[in-house]
Amino acid sequence: MPSRRATTVWTIVWLLAAGWLAFARVAQAMDGRDRNVAQFYHTAWTMREGAPGQVTALAQTSDGFLWLGTQTGLYRFDGVHFERYRPREGGDFPASSVASLYAPPSGGLWVGFRYGVASFIDGDRATHYTAAAGLPPGTVYAIGGTPDGRIWGATFNGLVQFEHGRWRLVQQPMGLPGTRARNLSVDREGRLWVATEDALAWLPPRGKRFEIATRSVGRVNRIAEAPDGSIWVAEADGGVRPAWTEKGDPGAAGPMLRLSSAGLLFDRDGALWMPTLGDGIRRVPRVDAFAGREIDAEGREAERFLERDGLSSDYVSAVIQDREGNIWVGGSRGLDRFRVSRLLPALTLPGATDFAMVAASGHGVWVGTKNRPLTRLEATGETPASLREPITAASRDGGGTWLAGPNGLWRLHDGVPEPFATLPYADYSGVQAVVGDGDGGVWISINRPGLFHFTEGGWEHDPLPAFPNDPSPLVLARDRHGRLWMGFARNAILVRQGDVDTRLDAAQGLAVGNVTALLEDGEAMWVGGELGIGVVIGGRVQMIDILSEPLRGVSGLVRDRRGDFWANAAQGIAHIRAQDMARAREDASYRPPVEWFDSLDGLPGTPAQFRPLPTAVLADDGRLWFATTSGIVSLDPADVPRNPLPPHVSIRTVSTDMGTWPAAATMHLPAGTERLRIAFTSTSLTMPERVRFRYRMEGLDTRWRDAGEDREATYTDPPPGRYVFQVTATNEDGVANDVGASITVVVARAFYQMPWFFLVCLALVAVLIWVAFLLRLRRIALQMRARLQERHAERERIARELHDTLLQSIQGLSMRFQAIANKVPPGDPLRDAMERALDRADEALVEARDRVRDLRTHVGESARLDTALRALAAALAAEHAVPVVANVDIDVRDLDALVRDELFGIAREAMHNAMAHADASRIDIDLRMDGCELVLAVRDDGRGIDDASLRDGREGHWGLRGMRERAAAMGGTVTIAARSAGGTEVMARLPVERAFPGRHTHIGRWWRRLVDALRQR
């Protein structure tokens, strides 16, 4: 919402505007009022180009956008795209039919609607005011602001003022007569002008009461101030006229235009533009020239531009001038723009074609055509001559100005064409080129082979023996040394000096194709043709390659007063600076830059390639003239209209495959954005087609990208991150806005791009590796268990074989020996020997049976280790009368069978050693859990074991080694040590997960180790 502005702000604005006006007038030597309205570059946008219809109001905001108020809504225009505006914040407009627009210098836009609604737009936010905010329920005809910061509105129900967020009626309290305020305006001095149905009045700066200017007013549609300070009004019934001057009669300030108008505008040059309600546009360049006169619809004093001239509609109601000096007109069918083109179109006669040009004395050019009279063209007008013959060639030299056509030759004398000679052939002959010989005669080239020379009252024909194919020259030129230069088709030049002819062609480096232009430049002769330009110096040919696309179809070459080169080519008019061309002559590898002037600059068509030639002429006043197939244009090289304002740049939208959003300071895009498109624009309205952009995305681009004329940047698969997108622009004259516009783009991360996801994946990989490791351990354990089972099975097989074969055989053998022994008489020494042998055999058999029993005996037979240990303890205690105590305080029901057998074997061997070798008086057996290990301990109180036996074992005994082998087989260890209190302790340890594989999972074992580790700490 706007607030009261300080007077100093408005003062600065008015001073800047006045300074700009002064700069514009000084910078442009040719007064814009000297142009006819038809000489402006005109562009129309209708509904076919996307423009809205029924344009009722126009305004340009500080950001450069052109705003169009229509009967169906509000639009804005950047020179390329029309966009219907709808605020993103503050709600949609309460009405749609726009009656007025006002753009404050401080920014924003006021919109006045029909039926009592006003809105203020600030960026993407709109604030709406209706009757609830004090606004009367009538059409808002106009809104304006005075330098003291007050905002005023002209409404159907009177004048209103905006204060502290509300509107209030001020008409009667401030002495303004009438009940309606039909329009208002603010002049350069800050006075507020208001038109009512009763009077035209003005309010002084910071004033409290209105002063009556005149009561002679009708239905005023628009109020405007002329350059001389007079106040003009556009009346729906009376037309356009001056209504007030500070001194004197208002009628002396200008004419009365009897046309129904809804608007008027005095441009920067002081010309009056008047849109009419059905008669197109009227323009009066100098209103003071017609003071006191009445001009009706048919009056020629006011220049006309109608629908038949290209105007979008003859019914036009709004007109403004933008900050670049362009005139914009809105009407019933669209939008029109009038701008000063760099190339000034000549006001030639309608229907003229094939222009033969030659410089006129003093200024301007003479132009002859095939179908119109000889005419002298000036920048702002034309003067026909008496000669009505068709002219196809013209030139000027020290002998005068020569004109030639199919009906003869003429020479100008004081601007009057005088017949000089008829052509050498009576039938029709087109004259291709003409040039004086310096002695009163003339050389011509016609559509017959060879060259023709008129001298001493007659024609001489030169068949040009240097060219056996009988060509005729396309162009002729005579240099300062009197040499005659002839340019031919197919890349050939003939230079004649006296009786000596010198030919230049591809052998000498000439590569211009058909030679269609010659320009003498000191000792150099510049050559133009269909393939480019070159220069001949001292008989040496050098081609010139330019920086941009190669020149094509050059049929006119001139140098201006500063020495710069101008070429009329197929692509347009090429301008090459003198210093760049001089460098190109010295350095064959240098490619000079070119400034182009084409259709956007007002160039109609392309230059002729056959005749008339040349198509470029330097006039005596320094103005350059160029002819094309469709018309003639001119320019002053010292006064080329330029656009000094840098283009305002803005970013419009951000699009992805998921949708399009209006650009904001920070754009948050979803994860997985595959295609990012950022649309931007510039509000340089003079020549938006030549605005060039460059952009970069900080974080993605390492350098600026040249977008050319494209207004969109595209990025594919931008990675997640925070980026800053920047765009700058350069206008048609190279004036850059290096600050440009920027937004921050944040591309979200997908879940698989989050840091936690990488941690989860890393943990998952670690778990998989751990699982694989555990599976490997499990496989190894299964292999070990299979081997133990194989060993036990082998032991059982061996025991079974020994029992079933060897022991049975020995038993049978013993029985036979006993039978034999029984046959020997008692007391016989032999029988005694045999008895003793049989006793030893019985002992051996018993020992063998014990060993076989040991091989076959395992706890599987007893089912549980605790039961087996207690039974073993009881048996040993009964056999040896030694206390054996077995203490088992854990549940061993799910003990691994192989582990059970090996532990039982270790316990049995340890107890056997204690009984057999230690003379123990007590043996204790403990089976318990110690942390993550299962421990079996066998202790005795015997005499202990010496170090040598502990280290090497007893000779002939394998018990200690067997216990260690059993422990290793089940994945554990056995320690045998002497006790400090006397005796020996055998302790077997193995991991609990090996002992109870079904009870302890891998996670449970890992958790148990962790708990044990924490407990130890």
Image (spheres, grey):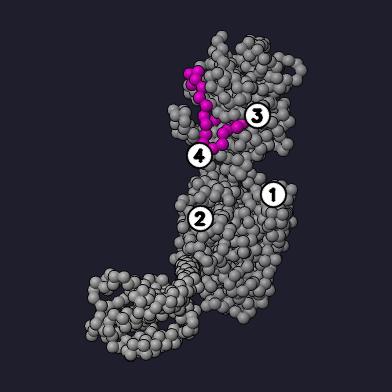
What are the residue bounds of the magenta stretch? 537-560
- The residue under label 4 is 638
Q: Where's residue 560, x and y in %?
A: 51, 33
- The residue under label 3 is 609
- Marks counted in the figure total 4
- In this image, 882 relative to 866: left or right? left
- The residue under label 2 is 727
Cα separation between marks 1 and 2:
39 Å
Cα separation between marks 3 and 2:
42 Å
- The residue under label 1 is 305
The foreground one among 231 and 666 is: 666
Tag 1: amino acid: Phe
Q: Where's residue 4, x and y in %?
A: 49, 72
Tag 3: amino acid: Gln
Cα separation between marks 1 and 4:
29 Å
Determine whether 893 is above or below 751 in the image: below
Image quarter hosting the C terminus: bottom left
At mark 3, the secondary structure is loop
Tag 4: amino acid: Ala
Residue at x 72%, y 32% (from the top left corner): 372
Q: Return the disc, 1 or 2, that comes first in the chain's sequence.
A: 1
Other residues around mark 3 within 10 Å, as few (<14) / some (14–19) / many (≥20): many
Cα separation between marks 2 and 4:
33 Å
| Circle 1 or circle 2, nearest the eye | 2
The foreground one among 729 and 300 is: 729
Q: Is residue 994 visible?
A: no
The reply to whether the C-beta atoms of the residues labelled 1 and 2 are less than 8 Å apart is no
At mark 1, the secondary structure is strand
Residue at x 61%, y 15% (from the top left corner): 441
